Image (cartoon, grey):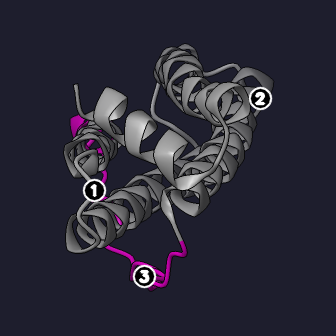
Amino acid sequence: MKPNTKLIKLLNYRINQEEYSSRIYYAMSVWLDNNAYKSTSLWKKYSEEELVHAKKASDFLLAFGIMPDILPIQSVDVNYKSLVDIIKQSFEHETEVSRQCEELYKAAVEDGNPMVIELARWFVAEQIEEMEKVQTLMDMLATFGEDKLALMLIDERIAE
């Protein structure tokens, strides 16, 4: 069952937002690297994973002969204040992406399109994993604190 116009629009938005997420995490990785943090590789990995997510939605549209829109990607702020700032922004970002994936799922269910429902379920399941990752980082901040020594230890633990 070919997706309707609303679902196609939401899938194109998902592609764009996953690419945007990749850029955000790449910018965070570069900032961390520039500021002597060891955990830069984690955000670089996140950046690469987001492109895999974008490709999944793109491949889905192509499977139906639908050319994905190549939309402009919103510019990314690169003025982070600290590792704490990056962790908190990552959490906020993944919370928003979760909301977007839920919206895609609800629209697919409302339309009754089983193929888009399955794809949307994949995105929702992926977000559970993403939220677990950033929640763990937030828990580390809550447990160990935000002073310089605590951040150095958190950075080293993340880098492992």
Indicate left or right for 68 with 150 as reference: left
Indicate left or right for 9 with 75 as reference: right
Query: Callout 3: 10 Å neighbours few (<14), some, many (20+)?
Result: few
Q: CA distance from mark 1 to mark 3?
A: 15 Å
Residue extent of the magenta highlight? 58-81
Picture layout, residue 44 above or below residue 68: above
Kindly state the secondary structure of the residue where label 3 is placed: loop
Which label's residue is closer to the chain start, 2 or 1? 1
Q: CA distance from mark 2 to mark 1?
A: 40 Å
Kindly state the secondary structure of the residue where label 2 is placed: helix
Q: Position of residue 137 (x, y in %)?
A: 55, 32
Query: Callout 1: 10 Å neighbours few (<14), some, many (20+)?
Result: some
Residue at 24% in and 69% down: 30
Residue at 67% in and 39% down: 145
Residue at 45% in and 33% down: 2
What amino acid does circle 3 point to? Val
Residue that carries the numbered disc 1 in the rendered image: 37
Query: Callout 2: 10 Å neighbours few (<14), some, many (20+)?
Result: some
Mark linked to residue 106: 2
Q: CA distance from mark 2 to mark 3?
A: 33 Å
Kindly state the secondary structure of the residue where label 1 is placed: loop
Indicate left or right for 10 with 74 as reference: right
Mark linked to residue 94: none
Q: Position of residue 45 (x, y in %)?
A: 22, 41
Q: Nearer the viewer, mark 2 or mark 3?
A: 3
Residue at 47% in and 18% down: 122
Give the overall secondary structure of the magenta segment: loop
Residue that carries the numbered disc 3 in the rendered image: 78
